[in-house]
């Protein structure tokens, strides 16, 4: 069975809720799913999953949530090779913040790509101004992502 890890960076629990809501869709597609709260670099690199999904909220002016900052700091300082990483990304934000909308998700996406990670498909950006319940946008996106990328565990 293929392994999927969902790495969560959240402030008020929205990104964790998304991770918990989409997890069954991956299980139905044959993945052994682990949700990683307060992730460390080792959780990604020491036991590289077959597929990773990042669910990251943006706080402040495009900043990473506090629980995700140590992971990002390790990515920046250790610069591991992520050429074996295949991932998807769900970014949560609020468009009323203008240019910093989904800033954490966009920055993470760029970091992962710079380290050799391969994003499969497009990044999902969920706007709190348009979508009250983030899983309303995330569930159909994950269904489409699994189908369009041929992701069967």
Image: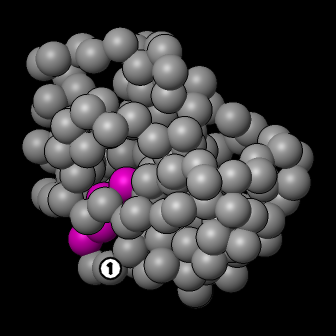
Say what secondary structure mark 1 lies in.
loop
**Which residue is at a point 84% across and 44% down the rendered structure image?**
150
Which quadrant holds residue 135? bottom right
Location of residue 96 in the rendering, given as x and y in whole percent from the top left corner: 48, 64
Q: As displayed, is residue 114 above or below residue 74? A: above
Seen as rendered, the residue at the extreme bottom is 132
Could you tell whether 64 is left or right of 150 in the image? Answer: left
Q: Which residues are magenta?
A: 7-11
Q: Colour scheme used in the picture?
A: one colour
Could you tell whether 10 is left or right of 140 in the image? Answer: left
Location of residue 65 in the rendering, given as x and y in whole percent from the top left corner: 23, 58
As rendered, which of 45 and 75 lies closer to the eye?
45
Location of residue 15 in the rendering, given as x and y in whole percent from the top left corner: 41, 70
Which quadrant holds residue 23? bottom right
Which quadrant holds residue 138? bottom right
As rendered, which of 53 and 103 lies closer to the eye?
53
As rendered, which of 28 and 96 lies closer to the eye?
28
Please name the residue that numbered disc 1 is placed on: 13
Q: Is residue 109 magenta?
A: no
């Amino acid at each position: 069975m293929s392994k999927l890890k969902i790495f969560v960076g959240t402030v008020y629990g929205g990104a964790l809720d998304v991770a918990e809501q989409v997890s069954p869709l991956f299980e139905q597609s044959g993945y052994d799913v682990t949700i990683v709260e307060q992730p460390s670099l080792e959780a990604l690199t020491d036991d590289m999953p077959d597929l990773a999904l990042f669910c990251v909220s943006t706080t402040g002016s495009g900043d990473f949530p506090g629980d995700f900052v140590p992971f990002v700091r390790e990515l920046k300082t250790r610069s591991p090779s992520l050429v074996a990483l295949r991932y998807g990304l769900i970014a949560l934000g609020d468009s009323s913040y203008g240019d910093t909308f989904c800033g954490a998700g966009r920055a993470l996406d760029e970091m992962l790509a710079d380290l050799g990670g391969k994003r499969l498909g497009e990044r999902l950006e969920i706007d709190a101004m348009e979508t009250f319940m983030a899983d309303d946008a995330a569930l159909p996106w994950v269904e489409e992502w699994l189908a369009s990328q041929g992701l069967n565990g």
